[in-house]
Image (tube, helix red, strand yellow):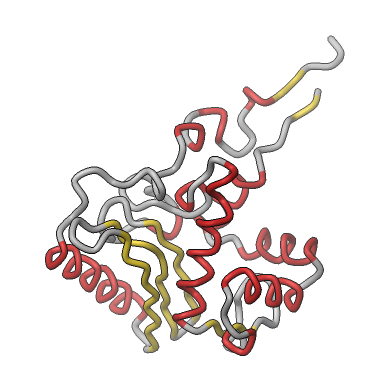
Amino acid sequence: MRHRSLTLAQILKYMNIYSNNEMAEMLATSLGGSQVVRSLAAEASEVPVSEIHLINGSGLGVDNRISPRAACAMLQAIQHKLQPLGLTIGDIFPVSGRDRLGTLVRRHIPAAAVVKTGTLRNVSALAGVLPTRDRGLVWFAIINRGNDVSSLRVGQDRFLQMLLQQWGAASIPPKVVLPSPASYGDASRLGAPVRNQILFGG
């Protein structure tokens, strides 16, 4: 039997939905390590490399630091590089209201926002893009420090809800952030048997 893998974009989607550190570390290693990732990210996002400090590929550890400006620029660069491939940022990051698993469980982030969470023992971060009626796509990065991470997350969600109240929700979420239809369905699941191919009968 042969099992066909998910595409790299689909693997990245699962990695980001669950914030899987082992997968992130393996991908960074395959690219040459954290310093290569740092250089590539700075070049693609056109921010000073001094705003991106990485000691590993997972982001675990207080020595991993990315400025809010760099976080937003990196997300915008990802979106720009995905477009020629027929993909959107929603194809590789969780979309609120659609991906109700992993890091978005018990979150109240506005629907259609594409986000990436980051959590340490006393740090909570949230970055992404919020579709609005009046301001279009609003790219954001929120970094909070404190011992009550749950309360920090509640505050982040409320802040985004306040922004949406002020600027209005987009009547139709723009296609540039919505995931493609192929991102969902049985074939897109990890280990889905529909991707098995029997080579030799028993």
Q: Residue at x 61, y 30 (%)?
A: 192
Q: Residue 191 vs residue 106: left or right?
A: right
Which of 80/115 is in front? Answer: 80
Q: Residue at x 58, y 55 (%)?
A: 81
Quarter holding the C terminus is top right
Which of 172/182 is in front? Answer: 172
Relative image position of residue 111 (x, y in whole percent): 27, 52
Does residue 82 sit above or below 20 in this rendering?
A: above
Does residue 186 sit above or below 54 in this rendering?
A: above
Q: Residue 96 vs residue 171: left or right?
A: right
Relative image position of residue 112 (x, y in whole percent): 31, 51
Q: Image quadrant of residue 10?
A: top right
Q: Image quadrant of residue 23?
A: bottom right
Quarter holding the N terminus is top right
Q: Residue at x 34, y 53 (%)?
A: 96
Which of 126/168 is in front? Answer: 168
Does residue 73 sit above or below 77 in this rendering?
A: below
Relative image position of residue 100 (x, y in whole percent): 37, 48
Relative image position of residue 115 (x, y in whole percent): 41, 61
Q: Residue at x 59, y 60 (%)?
A: 20
Q: Residue 191 vs residue 13: left or right?
A: right
Does residue 199 sit above or below 93 in this rendering?
A: above
